Image (cartoon, helix red, strand yellow):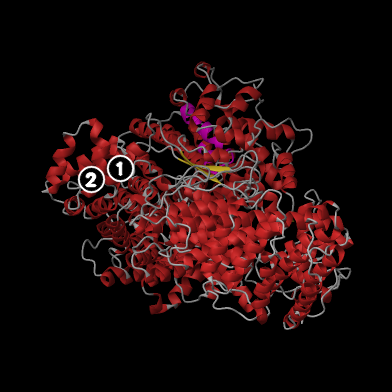
Amino acid sequence: MLEYHASMWGRILSGVFVQSTELTTMTARKSGSRLETEIERCRSEGQWDKIPELVRQLSAKLISNDDLGELLLGECKLQTYLKENPIKQGSSPRGPRPKLVEVRKHLTAALDRRNLKADYLLEASVLMAKLCYVEGEYRDALGHYTRVNMDDMQLAGAPVYRLSMIAEAYATKGLCLEKVPATSPSLSNRNTGSPSSNRSTTDRDQEIITCYEKSGDIALLYLQEAEKALSAGIQNRSPKPGPTAQDQELGYFLETGLQRAHVIHFKNGNLTKGVGRFREILRAVETRTTQNLRMTIARQLAEILLRGMCEQSYWSPLEDPPTVSPLDDPTRQGHTHSKNYNLSRRPRVYSGENLFCPQENTEEALLLLLISESMANRDAVLSRIPEHNNDRIISLQSASVVYDLLTIALGRRGQYEMLSECLERAMKFAFEEFHLWYQLALSLMAAGKSARAVKVLKECIRLKPDDPTIPLLAVKLCIGALHWLDDGECFAKMVIDMGEKAAEFRAKGFLAIGLVYSLKATDASLRSMQEDYQKKALGAFQRAQSLSSTDHLAAFYLALQLAVSRQIPEALGYVRQALRLQGDDVHSLHLLALLLSAQKHYHDGLNIIEMALSEYPENFNLLYTKVKLESMCRGPEEALLTCKHMLQIWKSFYNLTNPSDSGRGSSLLDRAMADRRQLNAMTLPDFSDPETGSVHATSIAASRVEQALSEVASSLQSSAHKHGPLHPWMTLAQIWLHAAEVYISMSKPAEASACTQEAANLFPTSHNVLYTRGQIAELRGNIDEAKRWYEEALSINPTHVKTMQRLGLILQQLQRYSLSEKVLRDAVQVNSTAHDVWNSLGEVLQAQGNAAAATECFLTALELEASSPILPFTIIPRAL
Amino acid sequence: MPVEDWLSEFKTLPDSAVSTYAASLREKGSLVPALYKVIRENYSDLLEPVCHQLFEFYRSGEPQLQRFTLQFLPELLWSLLSVSAARDPHTSGCIEALLLGIYNLEIVDKDGQSKVLSFTVPSLSKPSVYHEPSAIGSIALTEGALANHGLSRVVYSGPHLQREIFTAQNRFDVLTFLLLCYNASLSYMTPISLQSLCQLSSRVSICGYPRQQMRRYKGISTRLTVTSEFLVQLITGIHYAFCNGEVELGSKSLDDVLYRAQLELFPEALLVGNAIKSSMHGAALKSNNKEGARSIQVEITPTSSRISRNAVTSLSIRGHRWKRHESQEVSVDSEAALGGVAIPEISVTGVSGERMANGDSLRQRPDGRTGPDGDIMGTTSEVSVDPRGHDSGTRGQEESVLRSCPSFPLPHSWGNLDAVDLGSPDELMDISEMDEGVWPGGVGPDMTPPTITISNSITTLNLGAKAMKKCRLGGRNSKDKEAGPLTTGRAASENAELSFKRLTLTSSQSVPKAGALTSLTRTASAVFSRSFEQVASGIAPPSSNHNTSDAGRYSCILQEEGLGYLSPMPNHTQRSPSISVHLGTDL
């Protein structure tokens, strides 16, 4: 219909107005012809259907514009044809088409009379060449291009549509050159006198690439200009929005022009130039039309940076590429031409002060991926109706590629916190998508956001119930930072219930549930419960050990559990087995030392600790035990030296921390976040309770309070706790307290008090500090004061056994026997293996005249003392 | 014997010929395999001179010679790990020395100063060579986005400690760092080296596990300890190998490392490994066509969106809201907006599907009435001009309107599905700058200014570790040592009071008195302040008798080393601790 109209108009026009005049279009333009502008606008905006009408008006007005009319009609019919029969990438047009005959007629008419202004004449030739290409006459097309010198076409001041035309012309020329065999004589390299056809082919390849690169540059310029014109137009017509602000569609030619150059570079194995071309395209200021292209190219460039480059072969976008690069295919050397063309006008690039320019391949990849991500995210298809299934899949795919690459880039640099934030944005794609959920969970876990990680892992389990790794990861979090033992039990049971399907992970499942029970036993306040859990834990560890006899962890935890239940010889057997499997495992060595100390072989224990320390010189846990053993075997002076050594290690260890700590956490929000994170998810180390060692429910509460207060008040955020298992400040306080204890054992209250003060400066409300102060007061004979300190300590941590024992003794001295008995009985409930508590209880009972019960207590104490280690076994951390 | 020749050659080489020699090494085809053989046979007599020579190469500073040494790194690592697993410490002595030597060279710069590697985390809120923030449009207002707004964060690694010997504790720190160096020059590594890296990864991961039988590897069968970071570095290398010719070996070893990461429950390694695996599906297929080719292949992609224009996307919903908000100037209630309230200008009707049907039916009609220039705003005329969907048209208009007037104030309450959108980054800037330096938590107006102000991160970033150390040390002088004794009683009560105040804070949930908090802050901050300079210059406590108990000789010694700090302590009269504990009923 439309076609018919157009051709009819054409016939009328060419039939009626035969004569031509010398009136140039310039004057017409100067006169401010609305028509001219309208035509230009329609050509720029591709509104070909309006052209015939305008041509009619044009000719009617000036009678003389028929050549121009021919040109316009030819163009509009060609474009309309191409719009209806778009050329697909990868397919080449074949043969003449009947519909194009008219186009040829118009263009020939426009060209033949040679009355057109130079600009229009060029336009006509270029259109003719394009027509030839569409008809498959590549040689003819090239003939047309050689006749006009395209480099003469002015870019400055050219109307928008002409920019597009020039860009298309270069692209078409490149396409033709690729189609026509190189040996053909009629081509640009006419002086092929030299026999080295190889050289001429590389020259030719270079010419092709130059065509495409020019085309691409001009295309970018065109798109920028077109968009500018469009927005200007809209502004003029405001407030009513313009009628046809339709999406600019790049045709086949512009698309090819923009992309073919780098495709050829990569095909030739010339990564350096390909990357250079990518960067040129990306540095040009984006337009609406190039958004998708930019998204794709940004992703592809990021892929290359991550997969094919390394720090040493990288060069920054503002530098010249290296002349020799390992990235280029060595067999294809000789392609290292530098850019050999200049354009009078280039597309605008991003500019300004303080532009961020990446200095490293991961940085650049990350920047590109963030840009790509922001676009992919915009395209997230939200509707779930079945008709949009395909769209959803497309948007999901393009986004998940970007997120995977982001993970690779951020993972390399250990930026898990940022990664977890990125992946959270991916959640709008994630409905029922296991991969995205799982990656989010892992990133949360790596970023230390344990509580959220567990919640996300639950969803992962729902999506993939057969994978034993997921519940195991959840258990790991539950028994670690979170201390959610009931949830942990639940997850561990999932793994066990998988049975044989879980394969290697089955043993891990038993190990996990054993750990859960073991921790529950430590937490339990009723003795029967404790024993019950201990039994369950032992059973689970035994299963784990029998399922996986080469796993040192199974043997080790079995040994630890046996040790906790004071089966010392059995425990020794298993810890030796664990050490056979993994000779330098620090926890096994530590346990061995403690077991030896339980058998009162203090010197052997100390030897083991020293051996372990030669492998783990900075392990504070070992050092604490060393202090204890030394003051036992070699006297307190040696122990004090070890304390000093610990302080030195602490200094060298944490003073060296890198400056990123100060970078992060300096803005207010960071600090707020760090605070919250610490409260929610910080791994609570052994500090709060050197005696009960790994976390105990009440001491968690206590240390949380302690931490919250101390942190808020003293603002010592070191946001990263990556350096070691212990929070540095807690470690420091711990060291001071150990020193204090040594001084107390030497009966030096003043020194002990000074040390305690150091710890108190860090953690004033720690029950350990208060307990130590109580001991010092006792040492000074200040019973009342000591009592007050102990009471304070208990108000913070009501289950601190040592404090209860000391308080019990003081109450006894004050002759408040029944209260003393009560305190001590409570203490025994909490920890039934504390022999000194039993002993004190015996004394109290004796003082009350209950000789029989006292005897029993003394016997128990005696028995327990025989198997009591120098420090409780539970100082060894239990984690998966 | 290429190895012997190689050993003698370099010794006689004049300094000027080093670089040409480095280039000529490439041509010696039989040398590299022979060297591999020497490293693999742990007991070769040549091992020690070879290690020595490799170290000399590395020390020469000539990049090509350094890379020559680096190519053997995976094999050397395996040698070290397998020997240490077999507990035969004597044979690997020279390999240990070589690796430690390389490590110690790499952690310092040319002048022997500790090297700090830095990495700038790019941020979209800062203009770059590839984008400008305004074009990105809205950035989700998350905590992280706000915290990082306007500043590019720099992450540092290092300084690292010099290491004299391998211990179980530092072994993987050193090895991970060495792998990092190896990965930094991956592009220069030969295929043999990459294969060796893949082998190393597989073996480290599976030895001693059931999968070892599957892989039929018969070497050592004890389990090797690994760390998550080490695995991540291995994965990085494998990723490169996979993409650059070693498809089969690469994917096998990636599987092995992932297997191990699962068993060890290492989230970091799993994260990166999974991502590589999932992004590799396409890439692997492509490179199978051409043997050994790099799997970087680029094709011409259509520039138009592949997503159909009538699907509801984040963007279309965003535009939708915005328009609505503008027209009604009320806060958008998200339910109402989704529920398909009719809005005259836009034809987007949300998820209800109505709009969809519209679009589909229109697509079957390729053309129709040729619409006039556009006095009509209605959907139908819109569509007839561009049969490919109408809402994109409107969307386009909105966007261009947006772009043409950049200072247009955007609505603040742009309730997106999961994140609040912030349009203009300038607004964000304001927020972050206003917040700077404000004390967190409940601070009363009458409170004295906080002793530590958090300086703008840009300045702190420049503060290296050294500068910080200097600041800390600057604040103290020798007077501390001679300070008079402090009675323990006072110290004790002092502290009791502190603790008392803290306890009130929790129990009553109230804001502490300003004075109490400042003194607490001062005490604590003087001990461990990050920005000590402020403490030093900002507060000179009026009653700062730097007290140390005279018996605290021990802590004094440490102070000289700049370690322990005593806090300036305000004087307080003795007060008895006022917390009493009620322990059940008195029997």
Residue behind mark 1: B64
Q: Are marks 2 and 1 in contact (CB under 8 Å)?
A: yes
Which circle marks residue B25 in the picture? Answer: 2
Magenta includes A762?
yes
Residue A685 horizontal side relative to residue A200, left or right = right
* Percent x, y of residue B268: 46, 57
* Percent x, y of residue A851: 44, 53
| Amino acid type of the residue tagged 2 in the rendering | Leu
Residue span colored magenta: A749-772
In terms of depth relative to the viewer, which is nearer, B360 or A280? A280
**Numbered disc total:** 2
Whole-angstrom CA distance, mark 2 to mark 1, is 9 Å
Q: What main secondary structure does the magenta stretch of the protein show?
A: helix
Residue A507 horizontal side relative to residue B452, left or right = left
Magenta includes A757?
yes
In terms of depth relative to the viewer, which is nearer, A863 or A721? A721
Q: Is residue A534 above or below residue A780?
A: below
What subunit carries mark 1? B
